[in-house]
Amino acid sequence: MFKLVLLLKRKPGMSPEEFRDYYETRHAVLGARMAPLARRYIRNYLHPLRSNAPAGTEPPYDCITELWFDSEDDFRRNGELVAAMREELAAITADEENLFDRSKIYWFTTTQGESVLDTSGH
């Protein structure tokens, strides 16, 4: 699998609850249309447990979004398909203004490592 990861921050003035509701009910619908070759479209909403940051500061991101593809070739082909979807691309870009602090959006591809854990309880 090949994975694209986006780090996303909600726009100023929007609560975390408003952000999640808008993303799930509106933006994710547009996003799914932009990923015809993706196998998975996952949104991970962050809930900080503890921070060394000064009191009253917010985490730098509110959501980690993942788009999974069968291969890097599928990811690239998806990009070609999206480039041809002019109206949809304009709509999702315009909708980002309603939801995200666009100056803080970061896109990555990932290489994954996994550890085998002892699950025997010892």
Image (cartoon, rainbow, N blue to C red):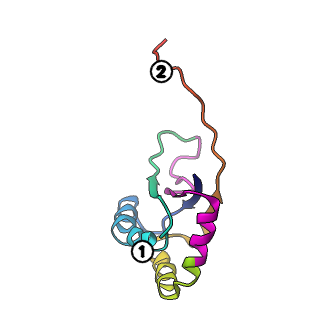
From this view, report whether residue 88 is shown above or below residue 103. below
Residue 19 vs residue 87, the one in the foreground: 87
Q: CA distance from mark 2 to mark 1?
A: 40 Å
Percent of width and height locating residue 81: 55, 78
* Chain part drawn in magenta: 52-80
| Residue 105 visible in the shown view | no
Is 43 on the left or on the right of 103, as rendered? left
Marker disc for residue 100? none
The question of residue 6 being in magenta is answered with: no
Residue at (60, 31) in percent of width and height = 115
Identify residue type, mark 1. Leu
33 vs 14, nearest the viewer:
33
* Residue at image location 55% in from the left, 41% down from the top: 51
Instruction: Tell whether 38 sits left or right of 16.
Output: right
Q: Which residue is mark 2?
A: 119
| Crowd rating for badge 1 (residues with CA inside 10 Å; few <14, some 14–19, many 20+) | some
Give the secondary structure at mark 2.
loop
Answer with left or right where residue 94 lies relative to residue 23. right
Residue 46 visible to the viewer: yes
